[in-house]
Amino acid sequence: MSWRKIFWAAGFAFLSNPAVAEYQLMPGAIIQGLDKITARVSEIRVMNGQSSQFGGLIIKVSTCYNRPPEEPPEAAAFLEITDAKTSSEDLIFQGWMFASSPAISPLEHPVYDVRVLRCVPS
C-alpha cells in the first residue's frame, strides 16, 4: 500500500471520528498578549478572517473551534502572526494554539508572548 493511501485513510478516519466532529466553529478568538518589556497584558478580540495589532505584532485569526459545553473546556485557534516592525511580511508564527496547552505550539519572540484564552461566543 502506498504512503498516499495510508495518509488518506488516516485523515479520513480522523475526520470521521465523532470526538473531532464535536468541535464547534466559533466566530472569533480572545487572544492574550504580553509585552515582556513593559509587563503589559492585553486581551484582544479578533474575529475569524480578521487581523489585530498588538505592539509590533499583527495577529490574524483564521478560525476558532470550541468544544461543546458538556465536554471538558478547550478552545483551539489557527493563528498567523507577522512582525510589523520588519520590512518583510514573513510569518513568525503560523499554526494552531490551544487554550488549555499553550506550550504545545508557543510563539517564540523576544518581546511578546501570545496565547489563546477562549473563542468568542456566538
Image (tube, rainbow, N blue to C red):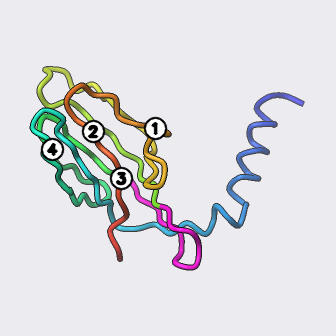
- Kindly identify which numbered label has been placed on residue 105: 1
Q: Answer left or right for 33 relative to 94.
A: left
Q: Find residue 34 and report its horizontal and vertical position in percent.
A: 21, 43
**Disc on res. 8:** none
Classify mark 3: residues with Cα within 10 Å, few (<14), some (14-19) or many (20+).
many
Q: Quadrant of the C terminus?
A: bottom left
Which residue corresponds to mark 4?
Answer: 54
Residue 66 position (above or below residue 54): below
What amino acid does circle 1 point to? Ser
Residue closest to the far right: 1
Q: Which is nearer the N-term, disc 3 or disc 4?
A: 4
Q: What's under tag 2, amino acid-wise?
A: Asp
> Most extreme residue toward the top, as rendered?
87
Q: Which residue is mark 3?
A: 116
Q: Earlier in the sequence, mark 1 or mark 2?
A: 1
Image check: 54 left or right of 94?
Answer: left
* Residues packed near mark 1 inside 10 Å, few (<14), some (14 to 19) or many (20 plus): some
Q: Residue at x 32, y 60 (%)?
A: 29
Q: Secondary structure at mark 1?
A: loop
Nearer-N-terminus badge (4/2): 4
**Local SS, label 4:** strand
Residue in view at x 19 percent, y 40 percent: 58
Q: Which residues are magenta?
A: 62-74
Residue 2 vs 22, above or below: the answer is above
Amino acid on which the number 4 mark rests in the picture: Phe
**Residue at figure coordinates x 52%, y 78% from the top left:** 69
**Contact, mark 1 vs mark 3 (Cβ under 8 Å):** no
Q: Which residue is mark 2?
A: 113
CA gap between label 1 and label 3 equals: 11 Å
Residue 87: name its quadrant. top left
